[in-house]
Image (spheres, coloured by chain):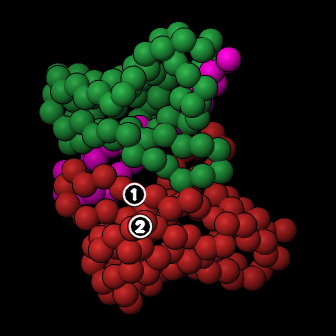
Amino acid sequence: SQELEQSPQSLIVQEGKNLTINCTSSKTLYGLYWYKQKYGEGLIFLMMLQKGGEEKSHEKITAKLDEKKQQSSLHITASQPSHAGIYLCGADRTGANSKLTFGKGITLSVRP
Amino acid sequence: DGGITQSPKYLFRKEGQNVTLSCEQNLNHDAMYWYRQDPGQGLRLIYYSQIVNDFQKGDIAEGYSVSREKKESFPLTVTSAQKNPTAFYLCASSKGQVNSPLHFGNGTRLTVT
């Protein structure tokens, strides 16, 4: 079974609209990482969340980790075409090292 | 600028041939990783190394081999035993400590026919 579930699988939004995507685990996580990927390229690190209830923002992107450290959301405000891509969440399941398990990713398209 | 270099970007091989993918980093990171990405399946860990001359199997190591003779380099060999080698391969590195983000290369797309 997939240990990290991401939803929705894909998303199309009109430029300027807000959106939220999610990443859910059945187990408590030691760290949750958000990455962005353009098709055929490597992953770009966005943010890392460690503590229950933690929230971080960078430009128009805000990521939150719930109190139980099992669910994270990524919110984009006033989406732009540059936000289009694949968003992946990765998780540290052991707390022993930096090895990460990833979700399947969410494909975001932004219509001009 | 520091970063991770994967080469080549595209690689084509005939079935039955071994092929080696290159990964070099100049970030002075201790840990390095190889992931495979297939459509609809996300990233899956093949091998990882937390220190020179040591490496561990990930979730899908069968049909692959690695070496870590230098801190900067972590080549991946896709052997003829790998049943479905066609995929996008991503190399990453990190400081190796808990809560250290992974930094990724731009990937190598391997096609085996």
Q: Check if residue A107 falls in the magenta segment.
A: yes
Amino acid on which disc 1 is placed: His
**A41 relative to A110, above or below:** below
Q: Which of the two discs, 2 and 1, labels the residue nearer the N terminus?
A: 2
Q: Kindly report the distance in space between the C-alpha atoms of the residues bearing marks 2 and 1.
A: 14 Å
Answer with the quarter of the image where residue B48 lies.
bottom left
Q: Which residues are magenta?
A: A89-112
* Residue B57 in view: no
Tag of residue B25? none
**Can you give x and y, in whole percent of width and height, for residue B65 in the image?**
52, 79
Residue highlighted by disc 2: B1
| Chain of the residue that carries numbered disc 1 in the rendered image | B
Look at 67% across and 66% down and name the residue there. Answer: B9
| Chain of the residue that carries numbered disc 2 in the rendered image | B
Identify the secondary structure beneath mark 2: loop
On screen, residue A17 versus residue B30, left or right, reads right
Answer with the quarter of the image where residue A26 lies.
top left
Look at 63% across and 39% down and name the residue there. Answer: B40
Identify the secondary structure beneath mark 1: strand
Amino acid on which disc 2 is placed: Asp
On screen, residue B94 versus residue A68, left or right, reads right
Q: Nearer the viewer, residue A2 or B54?
A: B54
* Residue B18 in view: yes
Q: Nearer the viewer, residue A90 or B64?
A: A90
Residue highlighted by disc 1: B103
